[in-house]
Image: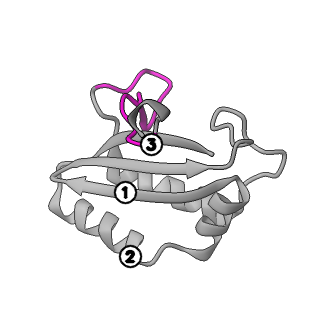
Amino acid sequence: MKVFGRMINLRNDPEKVADYIRYHAEVWPEVLEGLRTGGVTDMKIFLRGQRMFMYMTANDDYNPGNPSDTPPHPRVLEWDRIMRTLQERSPEATEDEWWAEMELVFDMHWPQHL
C-alpha cells in the first residue's frame, strides 16, 4: 500500500468554499469509480480556512504520474474542471503540481516505533 499527503488551497471566496464542501458531500459516482479503478483505496480531505490537506492510500501499482490506458470518464473530466475553479495552488506547489506533494516524515507504524 502507498500513502500520500497532498495540500492545496481553496480560493478566498466563502461561496467557493461552500460549493467545494457541497460537491464533496455528494461526489458523483463516476468520480468515485474512477478513483477506485485507478487504484485509490481511501481518500480523506481536511479543510481549515482555505487550506486543504488530502490523505490518500492506494494499491502498490498506483502511479500518480502515469495515467492508465483507459481515458477518464467525461464526468471525471467535468468534475476536475469544476474543482479547478474552486481551488488554487498552494505556495509550496511546484510549477507542474496542482496538489502539492508532502513528504512523509513520521508513521507510528514504522518498525522502529513498534
Q: Amino acid at mark 3?
A: His
Residue in the image at 42% along x and 21% along y = 94
What residue is pinned by disc 1?
45
Q: Amino acid at mark 2?
A: Ala
Quadrant of residue 28 in the image? bottom right
Q: Nearer the viewer, residue 42 or 92?
A: 42
Please count the marks in the image.
Answer: 3
Residue 68 in the image: x percent, y percent?
A: 78, 45
What residue is pinned by disc 2?
25
Closest to the camera, between mark 2 and mark 1, is 1
Quadrant of residue 109 in the image? top left
Q: Residue furthest front?
A: 114
- How far is the residue under mark 2 from the one under mark 1? 11 Å
Residue 23 in the image: x percent, y percent?
A: 40, 71
What residue is pinned by disc 3?
109
User: Which badge, 2 or 1, is on the more N-terminal residue?
Assistant: 2
Residue 94 in magenta stretch: yes
Q: Residue furthest top?
A: 95
User: Which badge, 1 or 3, is on the more N-terminal residue?
Assistant: 1
